[in-house]
Amino acid sequence: MPKDTFYNLPEAKRERIIEAAIDEFATHSYHQARVTVIAEQAGIAKGSFYQYFEDKMDLYKHLMELMVEKKMSYLNQDIVKNR
């Protein structure tokens, strides 16, 4: 889970970090993905990344949680729509 400092960021900055992470993990395996690249693409210092997440795995797990939430929201809307 992200640290509280991540949730205290402006929404636009949180979204930049998430989008940069999605791009990096979409083009590289977990082991090949680099925090340095994510930080650069998000426009943050690498040290700042570690103020928001414990490590790369922490960020990766957060992305998985976001994807599950988005999928569940979509499925719930579809169920309600087709009742």
Image (cartoon, helix red, strand yellow):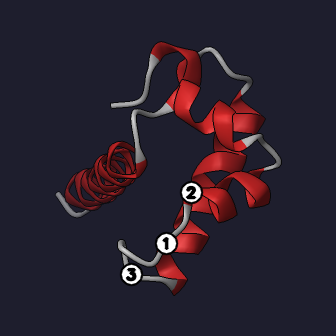
Where on the picture, by quarter, is residue 47? top right
Give the x, y percent position of residue 29.
39, 81
What label sits on residue 29 in the rendered view?
3
- The x and y percentages for residue 75 are 24, 59
Q: In the image, is 53 to the left or to the right of 74?
A: right
- Pick the residue in front: 43 or 10: 43
Q: Nearer the viewer, residue 66 or 4?
A: 4
Position of residue 28 relative to residue 18, above or below, is below
Q: Are marks 1 and 2 in contact (CB under 8 Å)?
A: yes
- Where residue 69 appears, as percent x and y from the top left, is 31, 47
> Can you say whether 28 is above or below 11 in the image?
below
The label on residue 33 is 1
Callout 1: helix, strand or loop? Answer: loop
Q: Disc 2 to disc 3, how far (Cα)?
A: 13 Å
Q: Residue at x 60, y 72 (%)?
A: 23
The part of the image, by quadrant, that contains residue 7 is top right
Q: Amino acid at mark 1?
A: Ala
Residue at image point 30% right, 55% down: 64
Q: Are marks 2 and 3 in contact (CB under 8 Å)?
A: no
Q: Are marks 3 and 1 in contact (CB under 8 Å)?
A: yes
| The N terminus lies in quadrant | top left
Q: How many residues crowd around disc 2 within 10 Å: few (fewer than 14), some, or many (20 or more)?
A: some
Question: Which numbered disc, 2 or 3, marks the residue that appears first in the sequence?
Answer: 3
* Residue with the mark numbered 2: 35
Q: Considering the numbered disc 2 on the image, is that residue within a helix, a strand or a loop?
A: helix
